[in-house]
Amino acid sequence: MTAEKLTIGVLGGMGPYATVSFYKRLVDAFPTEKDWQKPRILIDSYSTIPSRVRALLYGEKTEELLDCMTASLWWLVNAGCSKIIIACNTAHAFLPEVVKRFPESEEFIINIIEICAEECKRKGYRRIHLLASEGTVNAGIYEKVFSNYQIEVDVPDPAELRNIRELIEDVKQNRIDEESLNLFEELISRNMDIPVVLGCTELPVLYEECKSSGIEMLTDIVDPLQSVIDKLVLADSNC
């Protein structure tokens, strides 16, 4: 599949700044001499979709959420996308039900958690520490997938979850500052002995900001979205 024929769909907007960052990384990942050699990318920045975390924690607007996800995937598939990424970790907890509603979508969706697990297995990791939202942690979606690869998942404690929630909101509200970056570095440094998985799409935004600011991370970092980007580029280069 050449870049000209690859059409990437993104169900994003959860939140918008994470989607903007992901789009730039996607574009940068395909080095070309001309614009028209880049893959086509269709983004549904569905910011009005109900909260995935609140749906999991409180059962709030779950049916509306499922309807929105299904409708977005239907639009992306029928618009001609050959691969679709759902740019929200927590939303993957609802994928089984969405696929029941729209079975044809399954062949197009790239499961970012599955791809992340494959990368961790390839790197020989037996245990990782997960940084993620309460919804992702409570749903156990990383543990369910990673157990198939014989990889143990350490989840955040309550204090970490509070800090992660604060950092996610900093990105969502576009208010990243020095305090945000220092808190993020502190969370990473608490887990020096094992690799850290950035299990929320806002967290890679902070990671990129840290790198730009010269803040060095002294442990292995795994970004599920980057794992997906690498897989798309590799598949394209092998065709």
Image (cartoon, helix red, strand yellow):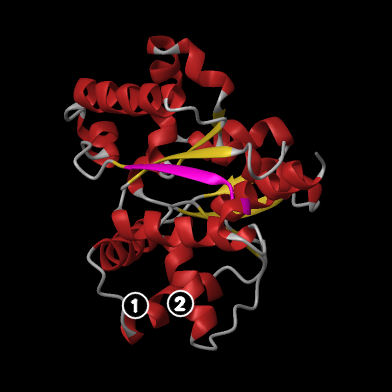
Instruction: Tell whether label 1 touches label 2 (CB within 8 Å).
Output: yes
Residue 62: x percent and y percent? Answer: 23, 25
Taking depth in this image into account, of 222 and 80 the one nearest to the observer is: 80
Give the numbered dot on residue 195.
Answer: none
Mark-to-mark CA distance, 2 and 1: 10 Å
Compared with residue 211, is residue 191 higher up or lower down, i.e. above or below?
A: above
Q: Residues within 10 Å of mark 2 (few under 14, many from 20)?
A: some
Residue hosting label 2: 209
User: For residue 196: magenta?
Assistant: no
Taking depth in this image into account, of 61 and 76 the one nearest to the observer is: 76
Q: Residues within 10 Å of mark 1 (few under 14, many from 20)?
A: many
Q: Residue at x 63, y 72 (%)?
A: 192
Predominant secondary structure in magenta? strand
User: For residue 38: magenta?
Assistant: yes
Label 2 residue SS: helix
In the rendered structure, the answer to whether residue 26 lies left or right of residue 124 reads left
In the rendered structure, the answer to whether residue 60 lies left or right of residue 136 reads left
Mark 1: which amino acid?
Answer: Ser
Magenta-highlighted residues = 37-44
Mark 2: which amino acid?
Answer: Glu
Q: Residue at x 82, y 42 (%)?
A: 238
Label 1 residue SS: helix
Residue hosting label 1: 180
Compared with residue 152, is residue 214 higher up or lower down, i.e. above or below?
A: below
Residue 14: x percent and y percent? Answer: 31, 47
